Image (cartoon, rainbow, N blue to C red):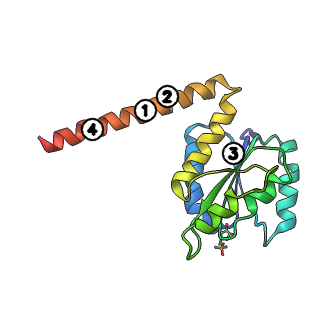
């Protein structure tokens, strides 16, 4: 029988239409082998489900909540108002406003209820996972080593791009 692993990170989204962007978060968490869960709930369409999720997340062992939402994106703020866990918001381009609506809704929280707001779209979704990993790596040496390797690989990729470009030119 497969051993059940308690998720440390919850990846929440307002709708299944957010999944193509939030899959960037999930990819990074999988690469780092971090136990996580994926949960769909909406601040507006399922407020009770959202509230129940936020209130119980900490007691279930969740350490960081990542929230992707588009339009009038209140989900991250509503969850942050009902949980003491760190909440990271990813604004999603879901309307004619190109994500500016979600960006402002997530970033412009009133003083007292913090939500760490990422860039709109896939880069933000990727960085949300990396920020969660940075938070957890403060207390986890192995995770810090993996993060360090990730950062060094990224720098090496830049150098490789330079070399490839020079090869193409010559
Ligand atoms: C938000 O409304 C969701 O996060 C999504 O980005 C947007 C549109 O949702 P759907 O109409 O595609 O379900 O709550």
Residue designated by label 2: 149
Give the mark nearest the N terminus, 2 or 4.
2
CB under 8 Å between discs 2 and 1: yes
Give the mark nearest the N terminus, 4 or 1.
1
**Mark 4 or mark 3, whichever is nearer to me:** 4
Please tell me how crowded label 1 is: few (under 14), some (14-19), or many (20+) other residues with Cα within 10 Å: few
Q: Is residue 108 left or right of residue 48?
A: left
**Mark 3 or mark 2, whichever is nearer to me:** 2
Q: Which label is found at residue 162?
A: 4
Q: Position of residue 146 (x, y in %)?
A: 55, 29
Residue designated by label 3: 36
Residue 102's quadrant in the figure? bottom right
Give the mark nearest the N terminus, 3 or 2.
3
**Mark 4 or mark 1, whichever is nearer to me:** 4
Q: CA distance from mark 2 to mark 1?
A: 6 Å
Q: CA distance from mark 2 to mark 4?
A: 20 Å
Q: Judging from the image, what secondary structure is the residue with disc 4 in?
A: helix
Q: Name the residue: 62% across, 41% down.
A: 131
Please tell me how crowded label 3 is: few (under 14), some (14-19), or many (20+) other residues with Cα within 10 Å: some
Q: Position of residue 141 (x, y in %)?
A: 64, 22
Q: CA distance from mark 4 to mark 1?
A: 14 Å
Residue 53's quadrant in the figure? bottom right
Q: Is residue 147 left or right of residue 37?
A: left
Question: 149 or 60: which is nearer to us?
Answer: 149
Q: Determine the residue located farthest toward the top in the rendered image.
A: 141
Q: CA distance from mark 3 to mark 2?
A: 21 Å
Give the mark nearest the N terminus, 4 or 3.
3
Residue designated by label 1: 153
**Mark 1 or mark 3, whichever is nearer to me:** 1
The quarter of the picture showing ligand 1: bottom right
Q: Judging from the image, what secondary structure is the residue with disc 3 in?
A: strand
Q: Position of residue 107 (x, y in %)?
A: 67, 56
């Amino acid at each position: 029988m497969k051993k059940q692993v308690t998720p440390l990170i919850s990846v929440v989204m307002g709708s299944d239409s957010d999944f193509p962007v939030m899959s960037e978060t999930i990819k990074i968490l999988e690469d780092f082998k971090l136990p996580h869960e994926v949960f769909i709930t909406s601040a507006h369409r399922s407020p009770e489900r959202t509230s129940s999720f936020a209130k119980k997340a900490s007691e279930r062992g969740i350490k960081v909540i990542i929230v992707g939402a588009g339009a009038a994106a209140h989900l991250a703020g509503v969850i942050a108002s009902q949980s003491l866990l760190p909440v990271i918001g990813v604004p999603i381009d879901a309307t004619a406003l190109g994500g500016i609506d979600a960006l402002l809704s997530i970033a412009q929280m009133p003083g007292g209820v913090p939500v760490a707001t990422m860039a709109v779209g896939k880069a933000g979704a990727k960085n949300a996972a990396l920020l969660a990993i940075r938070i957890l790596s403060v207390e986890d040496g192995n995770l810090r080593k993996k993060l360090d390797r990730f950062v060094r690989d990224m720098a090496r990729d830049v150098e490789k791009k330079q070399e490839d470009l020079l090869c193409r030119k010559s």
